[in-house]
Image (spheres, helix red, strand yellow):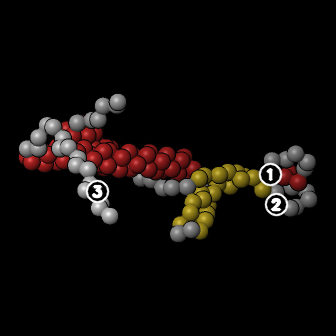
Amino acid sequence: MARRPAIEELERKREGLREKLAATAEMRPGSLVGRYRRCGKPTCHCAGEGAAGHGPSWSLTHVVEGKTVTRIIPESAVEVTRQQIAEYRAFRDLSREFVEVNEQLCDARLGAERARAEAEKGGSAKPSRRRSSPKSRR
């Protein structure tokens, strides 16, 4: 059987996660995509067979209230945007772990409360015997 972490250990872990969450930097959700396009002019370099096209043109896409939103990101902001996306993903993982630790802490405290209540009851070590139900007389 796996060992359950002690309440103090869970509290320390939660506090460490809280500090990491507070230290997060600028963040944003989404995916960054570079696209190459052809302009359609027959004499342009992009019109040749196998040509890569113009670009890349950078787009940041994410979902807001069930709808996909796309923003154009200038070339000068691509690296910063990548860092912001990475920071968001780290924040999301930390948040998930923070909730899991809090749930474990709640369960541990509930178990400790149950054990304390049973100890206060002073129940006997021997379980009571069940009596059979009275037989019906017909």
The residue lying toward the viewer, choosing from 21 and 121, is: 121
**Label 1: few (<14), some or many (≥20) within 10 Å?**
some
Tell me where residue 108 sits by quadrant: top left
In this rendering, is residue 132 above or below 13? below
Numbered mark located on residue 53 in the image: 1
Q: Name the residue: 48% across, 48% down.
A: 89
Where's residue 10, x and y in %?
26, 40
Q: Quadrant of the C terminus?
A: bottom left
- The residue that label 2 is drawn on is 39
What is the spatial separation of the Cα atoms under label 3 and label 1, in whole angstroms?
A: 91 Å
Task: Give the quarter of the image for residue 111.
Answer: top left
Residue drawn at x 56%, y 63% is 63
Disc 3 or 1, which lies upstream in sequence? 1
Which amino acid lies under the numbered mark 1 shown in the image of this protein? Gly
Question: Which label belongs to residue 135?
Answer: 3
Residue projecting furthest to the front: 138
Taking the image as shown, residue 138 lies to the left or right of residue 61, namely left
Q: Residues within 10 Å of mark 2 (few under 14, many from 20)?
A: few
109 to 42, vertically: above or below:
above
Task: Return the residue nearer the eye: 66 or 100.
Answer: 100
- Picture coordinates of residue 35, whole percent (x, y): 71, 53
Residue 57 locus on image (x, y percent): 68, 55
Q: Amino acid at mark 2?
A: Cys
